[in-house]
Each structure stands twice: as structure tokens, then as C-alpha cells.
Image (cartoon, rainbow, N blue to C red):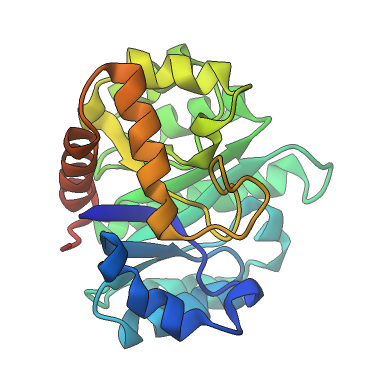
Amino acid sequence: MIIDTHGHYDDKQYDGDRNSLLNRLRENGVGAVINSGADFKGCKDTYELAEKYPFVYGTLGLHPNDSAEMTEEIMEWIRTHAENKKIVGIGEIGLDYYDEEPSHELQKKWLIRQLHLAQELEMPVVIHSRDAAEDTLTILKEEEAGRYGGTMHCFSYSKEMAQELIKIGLHIGIGGIITFKNARKLKETAEAIPLERILLETDCPYLSPDPYRGERNDSARLLYVAEEIARIKGVTTEEVIETTAQNAKEVFGVKG
């Protein structure tokens, strides 16, 4: 069964059919989903989804684009609610330099604070990084971010960067982008790194794979991602699904 290690089923795009869609996932070969918090509302909604659905788990944290929202009270809320057994990690957290705001210094401050929280709780991390490779890698190394495992979500850098992240204990999250014809770097990364270090993810409702590019994404479409990884690595689709599911179980402790 496929395990989707990063989705956003709290997104408003699912407001019309969330329950029916989630309840169909197992029929479509999906054993478990990890929903990832981004802003504070998303964290609260993620917690509720994990409580409601046996096969949905959650991670809690504030996305770098929402770091200006972070307060000590929100940090304490995350700490308290992360004690629930259905919450399996801290994230998504990280750095995003695509826009000027929030400031890079503010983003780095709250990334480090949330990394410390993950270590305090002995939990894996879910890292977001966009246009911030150097600072991300420096902080992750300095803070020993892979001590309890985790993933670089929606990986978009070079195979060399992936190998550095693996050295510090992280897995590489791969989703629908790998099916795009222009995804040369990601295809090279998938070929270069061990299958045992890859996690499947959707980032749904975004990044739907070909042949559904541009449409609302969901976890069942990870089959297309698994097929492309299998083609690149010269193995069967079943091996990709089974190995990445086992990876997810080892990193996040989910069942599925």
C-alpha cells in the first residue's frame, strides 16, 4: 500500500468532498496519509483530521512563509499537541527565500526553534526549502536536524545536495514533479540516491503528476510517481511502493 508522507487535505480545495475522497483512498491503494501543518489554522485542522481518520496522521509546524505569525503561545500549542500518538513529526518548517518577506533572519530563528522542539520531543522533521539551499544545509548540519530522522519535502535541489542531506540522516521526499518532462535534476537525484532513502509525497492539492498536471492532486495519484521512479531505477513499481512505504514506517512510525 502507498504511504503519502506529505499532503494538505485541510486545504479549502477539498471542502466539497473531503470526507468521501479520504474514505476512497484505501480502495485506491493508499494505506496511510501524513497531513502536514503550514500555518496555525492548518496545524489545528491537521490535528482534527488525524483524530477523525484512523489512516491519517499529522505533523505540526509553521511554514517559513508563515513564520511572522509564530509566537511563544503557538510554540507551546505545538509542543502540547505533538504528544498525541497520531502526530508523528514537526513540520513543515524551513526556509523560503523566493519572496523578501518574512525576513530571512526571522525564518532562520523559527526554523532553529522548531528544530530544537523536534529534538526535545525526539521527533522527525519535515523540511521545506526554496531558493535557500546553502542556509538550509548549514542550519540542518549545525543543529543535527537528522538526529531523529525526517524528510526534505518536495526536493528540488541537486543530487549532491540530496546526498549531503542523507548523510545527516534525512530522507528525500519525491512527488509529482518527477513525472514532468523538464524535471531533469529530480530524475538525476532519484537515480543517484538509494531507494531506501526516498519517501513518496503529493503535497496535495498541488503538484499533480502527469497526465493530470495542473489538476487537484490526491494520494491515489502517487502510483504515477512510483511508476516513474521504478522506470528511472530499473525496478518494479511494486518494489518502489513497498520500499518507500517501509521507509515511511521507519521514519514516522505510521501504519499502513
Please state, as top left, top right, bottom left or bottom right, where the C terminus lies in the image.
bottom left
Q: Percent from the top left, x then y, of residue 205?
A: 58, 60
- Left or right, 39 with respect to 18, comes to right
Quick check: can you spot residue 81? Answer: no
Please give the name of the residue rendered at 50% of the width and 31% of the height, measured from the top-left corner.
Answer: 178
Residue in front for this viewpoint, 188 or 48: 188
Residue at the image position 43 percent from the left and 52 percent from the top: 221
Residue at 64%, 72% in the rendered image: 13
Residue situated in front as seen by the camera: 25 or 165? 25
Residue 180 place in picture, x, y as percent: 58, 30
* x then y, percent, for residue 238: 18, 39
The residue nearer to you, when weighing 32 against 110, is 32
Q: Is residue 216 above or below residue 71?
A: above
Q: Position of residue 101 (x, y in %)?
A: 82, 49
Image quadrant where residue 86 sits: bottom left
Q: Nearer the viewer, residue 103 or 58?
A: 58
Residue sitting farthest toward the right? 100
State whether residue 209 appears in this view: yes
Is 148 situated left or right of 65 in this image? left
**Total marks in image:** 0
Q: What's the residue at 29%, 21% (across, down)?
A: 167
